[in-house]
């Protein structure tokens, strides 16, 4: 009877470890956009505490509406990211042999940039030779700083919803 109890205990112990491992893994998320900011508060206007790139991993600590408080895997920083920038899917950019079935495809990487890669854009331009891309190319080069965005919102008396 003692042997049977030991086997049951061993099975229960293994199951508890598996459940704990799964629970910890389910808290992990990946950045699914080309780049994203980790902010001090759940707001697009909050101070940026870190910048992450496509495929970077974070640990989900808390959820508040569309915002997720995350802990960075690379250091002890934490902050808030908008949920649209994250996925529970593990993104593997440079797979080893065992990871090749889970790796990001070139189409997924292009989508992460919310646009085309050079190959896709070249095909689109070739199929649409009459479209003038001058203004699109100019818009892609425009960069708005955090300060410019905040000034725009203040001068227009605009208020963000869903954030602080």
Image: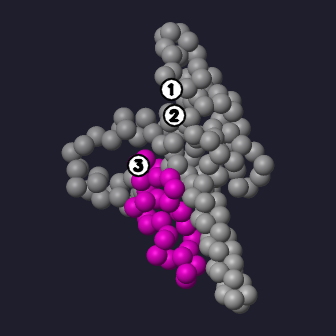
Relative to 78, is 31 on the left or the right? left
Assign a secondary structure to mark 2: loop
Is 94 inside the magenta-drawn segment? yes
Looking at the image, do the residues carrying marks 1 and 3 touch, with CB atoms under 8 Å apart? no
Residue drawn where x is 50% and y is 36% of the image: 66
Pinpoint residue 48: horizontal percent, then vertical percent: 68, 35
In this image, 40 relative to 122: left or right? right
Q: Indicate the position of residue 77 as horizontal and vertical percent values.
A: 75, 45
Task: Report the residue that reaches farthest toward the right.
Answer: 76
- Distance between mark 2 and mark 3 Cα atoms: 27 Å
Crowding at dot 1, Cα within 10 Å, few <14 / some 14-19 / many 20+, comes out as few
Q: CA distance from mark 1 to mark 2?
A: 7 Å
Query: Cβ–Cβ below 8 Å for labels 1 and 2?
Result: yes
> Does residue 6 appear left or right of residue 109 in this picture?
right
- Which badge, 2 or 3, is on the more N-terminal residue? 2
Expressed as whole percent of the image width and height from the top left, the position of residue 38 reads 64, 40
Of callouts 1 and 3, the N-terminal one: 3
Q: Is residue 24 visible?
A: yes
Write down the region rendered in magenta.
Answer: 87-115
Residue marked by disc 3: 115
Q: Residue 162 bears which disc, if any?
A: 1
């Amino acid at each position: 009877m003692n042997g049977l109890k030991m086997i049951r205990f061993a099975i229960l112990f293994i199951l508890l470890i598996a459940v704990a491992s799964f629970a910890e893994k389910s808290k992990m998320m990946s950045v699914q956009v080309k780049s994203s900011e980790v902010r001090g508060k759940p707001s697009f206007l909050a101070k940026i505490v870190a910048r992450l790139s496509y495929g970077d991993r974070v640990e989900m600590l808390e959820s508040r509406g569309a915002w997720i408080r995350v802990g960075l895997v690379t250091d002890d920083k934490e902050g808030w990211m908008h949920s649209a920038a994250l996925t529970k899917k593990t993104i593997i950019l440079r797979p080893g042999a065992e990871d090749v079935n889970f790796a990001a495809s070139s189409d997924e990487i292009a989508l992460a940039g919310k646009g085309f890669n050079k190959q896709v854009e070249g095909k689109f331009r070739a199929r649409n030779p009459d479209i003038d891309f001058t203004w699109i190319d100019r818009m892609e080069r425009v960069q708005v700083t955090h300060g410019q965005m905040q000034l725009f919102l203040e001068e227009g008396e605009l208020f963000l919803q869903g954030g602080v």
